[in-house]
Amino acid sequence: MQKTSFWVSSTLAAMLAFVTGCSRAEPSIEAYLKQETDQSSSKISNEATTEVSRQAAAQNEGVVTKTNVAYQQDKSNSKDNQGADKSKEIISIYGYNLINSYPHDSNAFTQGLFVHEGQLYESTGLKGRSWLRKVALETGEVLEQLDIDRKYFGEGSVAWNGNIISLTWKAGVAFVHGLDGFTPKGEFKYKGEGWGLTSDGASLIMSDGSSTLKFLDPETFNVQKEISVTLKDQPVRAINELEWVEGKIYANVWQSDYIIIIDPQSGRVESLVDLRAILPEQERQDLPAFSKRDHVLNGIAYDKQAKRLFVTGKMWPKLYEIELVLRGQQ
């Protein structure tokens, strides 16, 4: 199977602007991202000249310049300094290789996505269109579906102890259904909004649209602890769908086409994944017109047995299997 490489433009400044200070409805965000992408082409063309000039200037001042690798090693050696400026923390920037794409229901307002024992499950939102689904990964065929009461707006979901636990947006209730047949098993109450849900194997981890992640007792839904998610020491708001991947929390940020990778102990964003180019522009334009601003990346699923990573978006026509490719560090 041939892999298509996409070395997408990754701009930390754009993500910082988006997640730390911009309104959800701010119309200038996409223009800002596009401007950064356009500027990257001219920057790349002048890269060699700029690097020669920089090194010459540094040598004149007696400064030893570093390669990327040496620079990373230098920063990692000093990362334990208590007085370090967190705004200067190194963030890894990832692009991706596209491994494959699969059909995805363009009527599905994806809120939760996960793989359990090789099987894909999805929870969707919008009142009257909130479903729990078991889906054939390679064909997109819906194998089983449970319609959530139309008074609820469905949100994220996770597998736990043979069941699916799924959130609602503003109703303050989480439903428990059996993985097989979606048999009702009970429910939990919680305060605030429900957005994304995943598990580290011991606790559930829930987002609520803020910069806070809550670790919950899966048997009682009581809050065990909270962490604040930060990027360069700034809070990251609107954290949405979550996935536990090899000891890290992968998260969508609402109305962005980035994934952030979070350290579950500190809450620090360690990496950004730029997926702005994954949905072809023509397919994006063909999405349903009623709410195009919501048709963003949302849905991360990791098959931990096969080490496969999948992403999709709200009402996107495709589910993408990708592998991450380190583009650089900033």
Image (cartoon, rainbow, N blue to C red):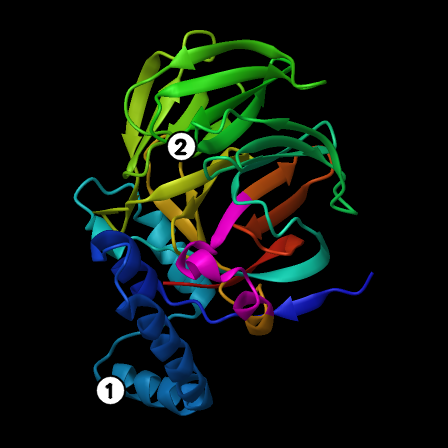
Magenta highlight range: 283-299
Residue 292 forms part of the magenta stretch? yes
Q: Nearer the viewer, mark 1 or mark 2?
A: 2
Of residues 330 and 220, the one nearer the viewer is: 220
Residue type marked 2: Pro
Residue 28, x across and y down, in percent: 27, 70
Image quadrant where residue 122 sits: top right
Image quarter (top left, top right, bottom left or bottom right) of the C terminus: bottom left
Of residues 64 and 315, the one nearer the viewer is: 315
Residue type marked 1: Asn
Q: Residue furthest left?
A: 83
169 relative to 5, above or below: above
Image quadrant where residue 108 sits: top right
Image quadrant where residue 329 sits: bottom left
Of residues 253 and 195, the one nearer the viewer is: 195
Tell me, for residue 60, which label it has, or none.
1
- Say if mark 1 contacts mark 2, CB within 8 Å: no
Q: Can you see residue 11?
A: yes
Residue occupied by mark 2: 264
Image quarter (top left, top right, bottom left or bottom right) of the N terminus: bottom right
Callout 1 secondary element = helix
Residue 224 forms part of the magenta stretch? no
Horizontal placement of 185 versus 304: left or right? left
Kindly identify the residue that appears in the image at 70 percent across and 68 percent down.
4
Horizontal placement of 126 versus 169: left or right? right
- Mark 1 and mark 2 lie on one chain; the one further toward the N terminus is 1
Residue 66, x across and y down, in percent: 38, 70
317 relative to 246, above or below: below
Tell me, for residue 108, which label it has, or none.
none
82 relative to 325, above or below: above
Of residues 78 and 165, the one nearer the viewer is: 165
